[in-house]
Every structure is written in C-alpha cells, then in structure tokens.
Image: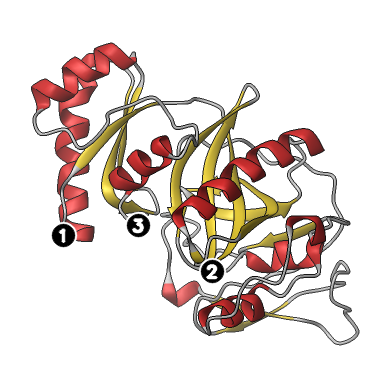
Amino acid sequence: MGDKIEAKRTAKKLGIPVVPGSDGGVSSDQEAISLAHTIGFPVLVKAAAGGGGRGMKVAHVPEELAPALATARAEAKAAFGDDALYLEKFLARPRHIEIQVLGDGQGHAIHLGERDCSLQRRYQKIWEEGPSPALNAAARDAIGETVAKAMRELKYLGVGTVEFLYEDGKFYFIEMNTRIQVEHPVTEEITDIDLVLEQIRVAAGSQLELAQRDVKFHGHAIECRINAENPVSFRPSPERSCTITRPAGWACGSIPPSITAIRSRPITTRSSASSSSTARPAANA
C-alpha cells in the first residue's frame, strides 16, 4: 500500500471508493491528454511515489496539462528517484479525512474513527482534529467499517491510516500510510486506546484483543503543528526557527497565558483541547 498507484488498485479491489482517474501510471503526454478529457478538467497530476505535495500539479485546462506533467515528473524524479505519474479528477473543495486502523495480521482489524486534517499549508497538515465536525455517527461507522473490512481481507498488521477526500457526502480514497503517524495522539485522546502499545502487542505476534464494540468515542481533540517560516519569503527558515516552551503554571489542554520562544531547531508540538471549530477545506493532498 506504500505505492500510490498500486494502493489505488488494491483499494478498488477491496471495495474502497477512489477518486476517478487513471488505473495506473500514464506513459506519455498523449495518453494523459486523452485520459484527462475522459475524466474532465480540472485534473490533478500526482507522483506515484509522492508525498507532501511534491510531484503534484493541477491542470485546469488542456493547455496546462503538458507543462504540469513535465514539472511533476521532474520534481518526482528529484525527490523520490521515481518519475511515474498518474492522473486524478481534481476536487476543488473537499475535506481531508483519515481513518485510523489497527490489525493483527491474522484477519482481525478494527477502525478507531477519523481525524480531520483539512487545514493545510503547502499540502502539509497543520491542524488535526477528531472527531471531524463534518461527519455524523452514521457516516463514521459506514466508512470505518468499509476500511476495517478491507484491512481484514488484507490481513493487515500494525496501525495504519487510510486517507480520503470527502466532498458532497462521498469519500474518495487517496492513499494509505502504513505506519503510525505523529497525529495519532488525537485518536488516543478520544478513544483512550494506546496505539503504540497495541502496535507493539500485534508486532510481537499477539492476536488483536480489541473488538470494534470496544472502541468508544468521547470528547474532542486537536493537534496543531507550529511552523516557523521566513515572514518575507514564506519559506522555512532555520535561522528563524524556535522552540515553543510551556509557561509555568500552564496545564495541558488549557490556553497558555503566554508563550516563550527560545532560538533553537524546528520542532512539531501538540496540544489537545475542546473545540467546535471547522477547518478550511484543502484540495486533493
């Protein structure tokens, strides 16, 4: 599931809804143009081995497709050593929803709800929350069971995240991260399930002890990624990076009375709190 083209093929076989697009990589500009007209513009050019927005370009009209292919191919080759590309229908205003899964490699798997990571900067997630303010219990249960069923068929081992675009009440698979992610504490906070501990247990060969009925959701959790950027060029700037420290007397989960910045290296930090805010939708990530 690490290769996006193969992951998409596998998802379709397992009954997971996918974004309309090419069944595999596009071998030529002519093939891409023909396929783009079939899908309908705008289309998104994506690197098969991509991530973080690299090797990903949008073509709104036919004239933009050839330059988008050339640029995406060059970026993909430089970043990943693999210039394979594929096409998807570009969804203009979706939400980015990811489903947390856990499997024991023996045919048992469950889902632990979703995280909403629609608020992004340069295709990098900067705000993760769970549960998503865009989903109700019925939608959560439906897509969660679809994913869990697929993981049972795959005999998936470990924790993982299946990522979707969500627009007009429909889910579209985009990729799967076959590892634990830095945003996993959001899920832990609303389920009281230690994902790292569960991953160690199944990795050691234990059968999954948790059943889907054991997963209960409560409260709301948010994780924020603090980004240090040059305010002039808006690019990551090491000389302006800083560590955000917790002031004395600030309890976890509360709003800090002040923030102290210490010149240091870039970091990622997290905080959980109750919120009813909604995130700005992001395009296909």
Q: In screen coordinates, is 92 left or right of 248?
A: left
Residue at position x 50%, y 25% from top? Answer: 92
Q: Secondary structure at mark 2?
A: loop
Q: Amino acid at mark 2?
A: Ile
Number of numbered callouts drawn:
3
Q: Earlier in the sequence, mark 3 or mark 2?
A: 3
Q: Tag 3: Cα neighbours inside 10 Å, few (<14), some, or many (≥20)?
A: some
The residue closer to the viewer here, 227 or 83, is: 83
Q: Residue 81, which numbered label?
A: 1
* Left or right placement of residue 8 versus residue 71 in this view: right
Quadrant location of the C terminus? Answer: top left
Number of residues whose C-alpha sits closer than 10 Å to that of mark 2, classed few (under 14), some (14–19) or many (20 or more): some
Give the percent coordinates (x, y) of residue 45.
Answer: 28, 34
Q: Within 10 angstroms of label 1, few (less than 14), some, or many (20 or more) residues?
A: few
SS class of the residue under badge 1?
loop
> Residue 123: x, y in percent?
46, 48
Q: Residue at x 55, y 76 (%)?
A: 267
Mark closer to the chain start, 3 or 1 = 3
Cα gap from disc 3 to disc 1, whole angstroms: 15 Å
Q: Earlier in the sequence, mark 2 or mark 1?
A: 1
Q: Mark 3 — residue? A: 2
Secondary structure state at the residue bearing disc 3: loop
Residue type highlighted by circle 3: Gly
Q: Is residue 134 above or below residue 265?
A: above
Mark 1 is on which residue type? Answer: Gly
**Residue 104 appears left or right of 261:** left
Asked if residue 248 is positioned above or below residue 61 in the image, the reply reads below
Residues 139 and 72: in front is 139
The residue pinned by badge 2 equals 180
- Between the residue at mark 3 and the residue at mark 2, the CA separation in whole angstroms equals 13 Å
- Which mark is on residue 10? none
